[in-house]
Amino acid sequence: MIRLFATHRILLPVVSLAVLLAATFYMQPRAMSYFGVNLLFNLAVPIALATVAQMMIIMVNDIDLSLGAFVSLVACVTATFLHDTPVLGVAILAGLIVAYAGIGALIHRFDLPAIVVTLGMSFVWGGLAVMILPSPGGAAPTWLRSLMTVKPPLLPMAVVAAILIAGLTHLLIMRSGIGTVLRGVGGNATSVVRAGWPVLRLKAGAYGLAGFFGVLSGMALVGLTTAADANIALRYTLLSIAGVILGGGEFVGGRVSAVGAVIGALTLALAASFLSFMRLSPDWQIGAQGAILILVLTARLIFTRRDKEQS
Amino acid sequence: MQSAFQNGTPIVALNHAEKHFGAVRALDGVSLSIAPGECIGLVGHNGAGKSTLVNLINGGLAPTGGSVTFPASGESRALSAGVRSVFQELSLCPNLSVAENLRISHSDLKGAGWRKKARAEIIQSLDAVFPDHGIGADTSVDRLTIAERQMVEIAIGFAPRGRDARLVILDEPTSSLDAGIAQQLLAHIRQFCADGGAVIFISHMMGEIFDVASNIIVMKDGKIVANKPTSQFSRASLVEAMGHVGVKNSKAAVRRQASDFGEEVLKSKDGLTARRGEIIGLAGLAGHGQAEALARLYFSNTSSWRMGKASNMVFVAGDRGRDGVLPLWSILRNMTVSILPQTARRGLVDRDAEKRTAADWKTRIGIRTDDVDNPILSLSGGNQQKVLFARALASHASIIIMDDPMRGVDVGTKQDVYDMIQTEAATGRTFLWYSTETEEVCQCDRVFVFRDGKISAELTGDDITEDRILEASFEMQEASA
């Protein structure tokens, strides 16, 4: 069994989510319905998108500390410009993606520590967000609102969205040729350079993808909340990192999993609801969430260590 | 086996190619052409210019002077001319599967079914080079053994990858393969050359070189000193051709005898021993475990928790940037960091003692600076190294471990440091000195030669000659043994 868990890294996140889900349904059987599941998970959709964005950065051995501020900025742009003047709104969002790619190129070209650059950028994004929306407000574009509240048959929107996000990013990152090369940059950048790939462009591409998924995350968030605030998604920075790691990813070496990242995000969102169902005081919830994270990571560490000892 | 192709247009031609790194002439005007069907055995001692030559051919470096051309294909880039390299240090992406690693070096694999094609191609290539390899195309590389990774890397080197491989450069390809697998590789190289490919084969196993090479090129000091068919070499003449690096130092100093030294102060599991006052040399080709042996020795005698008691050893780093200098600190602070605990009073740094020590060592070791408060990076490489020596020697440690400390150091500094080491050894300090330069090792009282991570010979007294060290560095038995 140890070998099974060590070779298929995706199993542990799946099992963690299943256990947590079973426990939640046991505590609150009424959650086991179309409506209940949607309620449990719909706020997980923007988190899942942000986690995928973070995964793109971690995939090339960097880390993004500006993601929460960036998603907040996107939310502000969505609730104002995209609602009032759609063309300008789209142009701004596209510009933000290009800016992300540019930051990636800069980090690679001058060999800057991503952690410092993105920490600095988080203040830039945060400042812009406050300038756009000094006080909470704005409105979600109607099409976005209806997209996020759509009621597909059989499965609730949140589950369909999670499956779509996981499937598409899996195709993009794990199956496609360019995704493989991108993961190669994280695994051994030297050998990718020797094989003649333009690593600067690859890295800019990875950051651009992160920007793209960051934009989707902000839009999804506004579609759910119908309004925005300059600080609406600040906690996404750490949630997204935790989601990637929970989903079987590692900080270095290009070891990431698209499906795992989405599952990790769902687990984190579910953990919060589970703790509420347990009637745990909100004061303790963040600590308890951390405890769940540590538990899963400990299990993974034990599996990989045991596997190494055995072989 | 090569005659049929010998008249073909060369795959690669170097015309007076030169490569300088600053003042160092790593490659000093090399002319060479490699025709289809040739298998070149490339030998030479450390720093002879082998890897620089390889990097010029595979496009990793641009020549400072002269030219590198690919006449047979008419291409200007090495990759498109079908030149492949298999490097000694493993260069696979460990997080990807075997087939995905092929994709990294084969950019033409595109479209929906690329995985299937990649799987087929890598398995075909593995089958061709290493029958019965037992490696799955979907296995993640980090789950393979070192030998299997090396096999995959070689297989990727020989794989078609859109255009056929014309010249494959193998740098110590058999270093982690066992004899049987190595034989499979040699057989494949012969077949590959017979079919019109060319190979550059770098190895420390003489048996393999004689076994597979059609020509042997001997390099020394950035030049090609011999380029002849293998049949015109014998083992002895090959060692002879590689030897005699630089000027023969007339050894004025009389060799010290075993009786001149004190009791044994050190004995490691690897078999290294040292007596008080002795200068021990560690020799052999670079990367054969000398630095690791020293690091093991040092770390087993120090503790991350306790200070003081265990620190009868100090370490002089050769890779100054990585584990030597503290780049933001002044010369003085870099020098005195090792003696802080000894001079500190009630946990506070004694600045006067620091200054005295720095001034003392500045004159004793001859650091060329006006002011020891200048930043360390204002010094030349050689003087930075002197600061590191001062740091080690200023401590009370009786055993000094030196990991190739003379890397990139000018001749004048070297002489200063040699004298310093001799003087300090006379006062009863023990030195363990790993050097890639044979000339330096020859100054030691006793020499351990490393090969494949183990000690292959222990030389003493008049046995410490360049020829003996070379002999022990290269595997002389037949590879098929």
Image (cartoon, coloured by chain):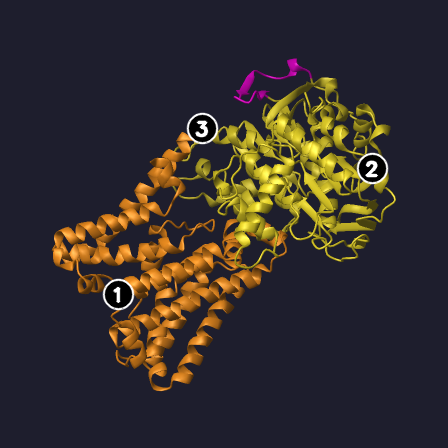
Pointer 3: what residue?
A: B310
- B455 part of magenta stretch: no
Q: What colour is chain B? A: yellow
On residue A121, the disc is: none
- B275 part of magenta stretch: yes
Mark 1 or 3, which is nearer the eye?
Answer: 1
Rendered view: B189 above or below A286:
above
Q: Is residue B49 left or right of residue A120?
A: right
- Quadrant (top left, top right, bottom left, bottom right) of the C terminus of chain B: top right
Q: Which residues are magenta?
A: B257-276
Q: What colour is chain A? A: orange
Q: Nearer the viewer, residue A294 or A16?
A: A16
Q: Residue at x 13, y 52 (%)?
A: A27
Pointer 2: what residue?
A: B2
Q: Rate crowding at label 1 as few (under 14), some (14 to 19) or many (20 or more) other CA atoms within 10 Å.
A: some
Distance from disc 2 to disc 3, alpha carbons, whole Å, reads: 61 Å
Pointer 1: what residue?
A: A43
